[in-house]
Every structure is written in C-alpha cells, then in structure tokens.
Amino acid sequence: MVEIEYKNTRVKLGDSDLVYEPAEDSFLLADAALEEAEPGMCILEIGAGSGFVSAVLRANTPGIRVLATEINPHAARCAKANGVEVIRTDLFKGIRSGSRGASFDLILFNPPYLPTSEEEKVPGWLNYAFDGGASGRETLDRFLDDVRDYLKPGGKILILISSITGLEAVKEKMMKIGFEAGVVGRKKISFEELMVVRGELS
C-alpha cells in the first residue's frame, strides 16, 4: 500500500496502478488551494483522483465543506477511503447547477493536460488522468464551458495546466467567459513548467 504524507495529511493510494499517484502538479495545486481556502467556504474539486488535494484542504482549513467528483471508479473509491466526499461522475454531470442546486465559493481542477494522439492513449481508466486530446485542452474546455453555473457570485476557480497546454489560449478562453485570469503558482520540471491559473468572476 503506497502512502503519501503532506502537510498534516496521509493519503493512501490503494492499487496505484489504477489511480494517478499525486506528483508535482498535485502538490502545486494543493498549495495554491490552501492559499485561497477560508473557513466557511464550500469547495468543489473536479477530477479528484486519489482525493489528495481535497484531503489536504480538509486537514488544514477548519470549517470548510469539500465535495469532489471523479470518473475513474478505482480513484473514486480511493478518495472515499481517504475521507473525501466524492461523487463518481464525469466533471459536473452528477451535480445539479443553478440557484436551487449546488453553488461553490471555490472550484479546483487538475485536468488531463497532455496533448494526446490516438496512439498515445493509455489503456483503461488511467487514461482519464492523462489524455487532454489533440490540443491538451479538450477536457479543460468542457470544464470551462460549464463551471460558471456552479459558482457563487464572486466565486473563484483554480486550474492546473502545463506550459505545453498553452497558457495564453487558456487565459483567453477564461476571459471570454467572464473570468479575470492570472497565474498564482509555477514550478519548472524537466521539459515543462506547471502553472496554477486563478480565475475570478469579474
């Protein structure tokens, strides 16, 4: 059983061959989320994987409610075992939007951001963690198309992208749908730079 300890949190991965193991991108998003999270907030993490980011938030920020979604059934079970309230669904599909549905102060997403051809797809559920489509932004674009419906007025989003994903294209899309966008975290690793982009409804 693989376990990761980080900031007062211990996350168990179970069968790590079927669940994305938290790495530099996960740590960067967790740190940025801790900067944004405040007591009393209602927070949603889309694509929670093992539940690492949500678990770190819950352990370090008192008085918040964290809900997560995850499409991979093995990862969803792992997140639940790590104490995360998780719905197994694709992005927002399992959550009702609008004033009578769920509204969140902060929504987090570490999407699959690698440009991926048909030949590069990974077999099975783990492909959802890596496959960003030809542009590297296909899943992220679907997220951005819907995210406003789930935010409270003045709500914020944090998304993790790579320099390969195309920062300017992401910011342009965010601004087009009404977000003020800026980079709040960066980490250089090998051939790419990881970035956390913060969006606030303007």
Image: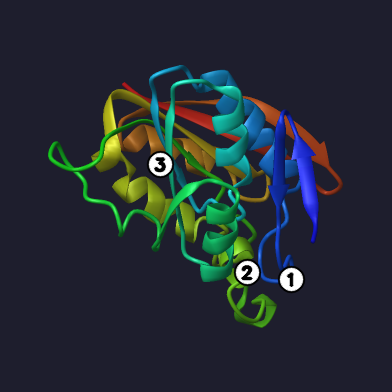
Lateral position of residue 28 relative to residue 79, left or right: right
Q: For mark 3, what is the residue? A: 173
Q: The disc labelled 3 sits on which kind of residue?
A: Lys
User: Could you tell me which secondary element the residue under label 1 belongs to?
Assistant: loop
User: In the image as oriented, which residue stretches furthest toward the left?
Assistant: 100
Does residue 124 lie above or below 158 as drawn?
below
Answer with mark 3 or mark 2, whichever residue precedes in sequence.
2
Amino acid carrying label 1: it is Asp
Query: Is 50 or 36 nearer to us in this picture?
Result: 50
Closer-to-camera residue (66/71): 66
Tell me where residue 146 appears, x and y as whole percent: 30, 48
Name the residue rendered at 39%, 63% in the picture.
89
Mark 2, residues whose alpha carbon is within 10 Å: few (<14), some, or many (≥20)?
some
For residue 121, above or below residue 150: below
Quarter of the image with the C terminus in it: top left
Vertical order, 40 against 117 (above or below): above
Question: Amino acid under label 2?
Answer: Thr
Tell me the residue at 62%/54% (across/down).
Answer: 50
Asked if marks 1 and 2 touch (Cβ < 8 Å), the reply is no
Residue hosting label 2: 116
- Mark 3 and mark 2: span between their CA atoms? 20 Å
